[in-house]
Image (cartoon, rainbow, N blue to C red):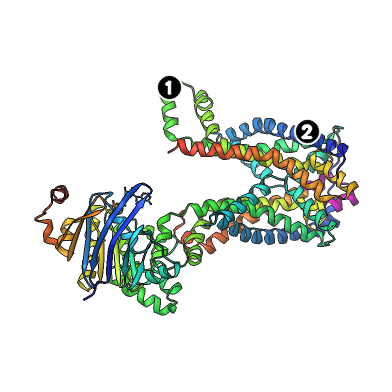
Amino acid sequence: MSPIIKLSNVSKSFGALQVLDGISFDVHPGSVVALIGRSGSGKSTALRCMNGLETIDSGEIDICSHRLGTTVEKGLLRALHLDVGMVFQSYNLFPHLTVGQNIMLAPRWVKKSAKGEARERAMEVLSRVGLAEKFDSYPEQLSGGQQQRVAIARSLAMQPKVMLFDEVTSALDPELTGEVLRVMESLAREGMTMVLVTHEMAFARRVADTVIFMHKGRIHEKGPGAMLEAPSTPELAQFVGNGL
Amino acid sequence: MLTTFQIQALLVGALWTVGLALVAFIGGGVIGLLVAVTRVSRHRIVRNLSFLYVQIVQGTPLLIQMMLAYFGLSLLGYDLPPFAAACLAIVVYASAYFGEIWRGGILTVPKTQWEAAECLALSDAQRFWLIIVPQALRLSTPPTVGFMVQVVKNTSLASVIGVADLTYTSKLINNSTFQPFQVFVLVAALYFVMCFPLAWWSRKLEDRLNVSNH
Amino acid sequence: MAYQFDFSFLSEYWPELLRGLWLTLKMSVLTIVLGFLVGTVLAIGRTAHSAWVRRACGVYVEVIRNTPLLIQMFLIYFGLASLGLKLGANFCAILSIVINISAYTCEIMRAGIESIRKGQLEAAQCLGLSRLQTLAAVVLPPATERVYPALTSQFILIMLTTSVVSQISAEELTSIAARIDSITFRSFEIYLVVALLYILLAVAVRGTFWLIARLVFPRLRRLGTPL
Ligand SMILES: Nc1ncnc2c1ncn2[C@@H]1O[C@H](COP(=O)(O)OP(=O)(O)O)[C@@H](O)[C@H]1O
Ligand SMILES: [Mg+2]
């Protein structure tokens, strides 16, 4: 089976700061890849390059049969964003729109779905994250965990082939992370291809097919979830030691 | 082309404009301070009267205020030059806006400052005038300077009651030369030279305040 | 000091004054709507990618905001006439007020646009929205809601500013007052009445904007909290 995402020797600098230094990895359809590593190791940047929020300096990224090189044209980005969903640490729900409107916005405006259809679909994804009764609430009326689940639903409503998650539980109180992780886990079980940056080691070990440990802009160690129990590099051992 | 005499006349008009603006800054500033302080007064009646004053002044055009000052003063039997009426009107006008800006400043002085001041052995009035007001004025310098631009520009309305300011003079010259572009572009440039430095300064002050707040 | 106030002119001229009030209201609504639209476009220009567009909009705003409306009006009215363009005083008045107010609206709307966090734009982009769609659905509505109080104050100021139009003798409240004054010579009384009418208008405009906010910002209507 050919990979749905393929990073080949990707490098990226911000000014003099080299953030990604020759990253390569594959993601196969239906699999879950977890990026872990210390703050500042380039995890978010890797994720953001994968859906064109940052342009790369060298190498290439193939994702859902779109090719991102060192220059990216706008049309390609829009097509890419139809296939790749992204969920952020800070939810980024639109505060002036209700939950339902947040979810229906892109289906209506981008996919030009009919109103009834978009509404049905919004209800469906909202039920999937267990928030059907919040359809008419405003984001500020929800808890952080609920907002993040709405953000996941909003992304799901576009029926993406791949979903990217950037530390989606890091802004949440510990007692609220569980509800979000459960939603992600059920998505993984249903066969969604996911790349996620996370600090939840137990979650990564349980759900990820592949764990990638990033260190100073490079892939320092890569392997199945079980790798976290028997790190082969001292850096990962130290990282896991601190994390658990 | 404009003659030297006409350009001289415009410059003299500009002096009147500057004079009127200065009167507005000083007179409006003094009364404005009174407005700001009475707007946050403990006494309900004082507060309400001050509020009413602001509502009336901010609810009427400066042009109408000019007219009222002009005709009002002459009704009172004073045979004063239009400049006096213009001064009265623009001082009243500026005082309401300065007052509101500074009231905003007083209200944004952090609560902790009020509390800290309470620990010092100062009377209520001392506390207010020595600690709160200076800070409030500092906090509101950018909008204050910003409003000064409005004042300079709005002195142009004094031309309506016959003050021989820059605008009035420009209109006279235009009537005789029929060179509207030359005259009014030059006059606009003169106003710009008076206003832009204030606007620029206001922005600098704001940037500095933002930096020191972070 | 025995001045006798005489408001008897009112019995004859009140319909005229009401007409003036109506004309001022009409002119205000027109200039507010147009000024808001032009100002918003300028604000978008002020945040555009192209440095040239940003700079051009910036210069426009600075020039307009640092020169008096009256001079702008004279320049347009007498200037266009000297070019042989007879556009009428009313048209010139509306044009110059729209030009003037758009510069102020631009700066207010720019503050609103800049208050929108980058994450909002990225979220919209990741959902596949185009730049224009993002602007229309994600940026402008909350930006407008946030600066709405400042816009309201500015719009009341415009309503008052329309009185300046009387200087090129167009049709509105102040010019009608001047005409009545020239017939009756009850100057002080007339301008007192006119001042009162402006205050009423200001109160009415403020109330109208409060209602409009409830109409166009459903979140505000439901929750009542600022965004
Ligand atoms: N837009 C940017 N401009 C400049 N530096 C950036 C930018 N984004 C990230 N960085 C820097 O790149 C490094 C890696 O950031 P990031 O990918 O966010 O790391 P991580 O997500 O692993 O914590 C950090 O040192 C960060 O400060
Ligand atoms: Mg990160």
Report the Cα–Cα distance between label 2 and label 1. Answer: 48 Å
Q: Quadrant of residue A30?
A: bottom left
What's the chain of the residue with tag 1? Answer: B
Asked if residue A188 can be seen in this view, the reply is yes
Q: Amino acid at mark 2?
A: Leu
Nearest to the observer: residue A65 or residue C154: A65
Of tags 2 and 1, the one toward the viewer is 2
Q: Which residue is mark 2?
A: B15
Nearest to the observer: residue C119 or residue B22: C119
Near mark 2 (Cα within 10 A), the count class, few <14, some 14-19 or many ≥20, is some
The image position of residue C122, as x and y in percent, is 40, 60
Mark 1 falls on what kind of element? loop
- What secondary structure do most residues of the magenta stretch adopt? helix
The image position of residue B207, as x and y in percent, is 51, 39
> With C50 as the anchor, is B98 left or right in this view?
right
> Which label's residue is closer to the chain start, 2 or 1?
2
The image position of residue B93, as x and y in percent, is 69, 40
Give the label on residue B68, or none.
Answer: none
- Quadrant assignment for the N terminus of chain B: top right
Instruction: State whether residue B156 is above or below residue A68.
Output: above
Residue drawn at point x = 75 percent, y = 50 percent: C72
Q: Which residue is mark 1?
A: B120
Residue at the far top: name it.
Answer: B121
Tell me whether marks 2 and 1 sit on the same chain: yes
Label 1 beta carbon within 8 A of ligand 1: no
Disc 2, disc 1: CB below 8 Å?
no
What's the chain of the residue with tag 2? Answer: B
Q: Which residues are magenta?
A: C177-192
Q: How many marks?
A: 2
Residue drawn at point x = 68 percent, y = 59 percent: C31
Residue drawn at point x = 11 percent, y = 60 percent: A226
Q: Amino acid at mark 1?
A: Leu
